[in-house]
């Protein structure tokens, strides 16, 4: 088990498990065929720009089916594709946007691939 502390949050990682613990509450994903999806992508740039608390919280996380052909797989694949003839991957383009713009973009892409809030 690994334990990380970032900006007052504790992160535990185990094989097939991911925990975020903040203010006594935890979010847990296990081998149930589901995965926690960050609407605003978790990456070093976003954590540096917006802070870990804004990225790793229940307002930015949704649980999605995680298997081949799932919404999660389709969204992840889309973020790895090239964005509108820019030569940039979608995730690199989105990373240039503000938090609110990234959030709106993420929600629209989820809906495009069949997610219903």
Image: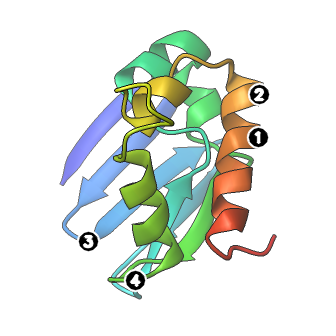
Disc 2 to disc 1, C-alpha distance: 6 Å
Disc 1 to disc 4, C-alpha distance: 23 Å
Question: Mark 3: which secondary structure?
Answer: loop
Q: Earlier in the sequence, mark 3 or mark 2?
A: 3
Residue 58 in sight: no
The answer to whether residue 12 is above or below residue 45 is below
The image's colour scheme reads rainbow
Residue 109: x, y in percent?
Answer: 64, 55
Residue, disc 1: 104
Residue 39: x, y in percent?
Answer: 61, 47
Q: Earlier in the sequence, mark 1 or mark 4?
A: 4
The answer to whether residue 48 is above or below residue 79 is above
Residue 32: x, y in percent?
Answer: 41, 88
Question: Do the numbered discs 2 and 1 sit on residues whose CB atoms are within 8 Å?
Answer: yes
Q: Residues within 10 Å of mark 1 (few under 14, many from 20)?
A: some
Question: Do the numbered discs 3 and 1 sit on residues whose CB atoms are within 8 Å?
Answer: no
Front position among marks 3 and 1: 1
Question: Mark 4: which secondary structure?
Answer: loop
Viewer-nearest residue: 10 or 41 = 41
Q: Residues within 10 Å of mark 4 (few under 14, many from 20)?
A: few
Question: Do the numbered discs 1 and 4 sit on residues whose CB atoms are within 8 Å?
Answer: no
Front position among marks 4 and 2: 4
Q: Which mark is residue 69?
A: 4
Write down the quadrant of residue 33 in the picture. Answer: bottom left
Residue at the limit of the structure toward the bottom, as seen here: 32
Residue, disc 3: 16
Residue, disc 2: 100
Disc 3 to disc 1, C-alpha distance: 29 Å
The answer to whether residue 37 is above or below residue 6 is below
């Amino acid at each position: 088990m690994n334990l990380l502390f970032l900006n007052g949050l504790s992160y535990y990682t185990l094989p097939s498990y991911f925990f975020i613990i903040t203010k006594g509450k935890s979010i847990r994903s296990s081998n149930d065929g589901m995965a926690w999806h960050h609407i605003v992508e978790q990456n070093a740039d976003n954590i540096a720009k917006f802070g870990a608390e804004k990225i790793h919280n229940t307002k930015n996380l949704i649980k999605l089916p995680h298997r081949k052909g799932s919404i999660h797989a389709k969204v992840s694949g889309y973020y790895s594709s090239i964005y509108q003839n820019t030569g940039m991957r979608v995730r690199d383009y989105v990373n240039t946007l503000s938090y609110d713009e990234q959030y709106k973009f993420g929600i629209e892409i989820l809906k495009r691939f069949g997610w219903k809030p």
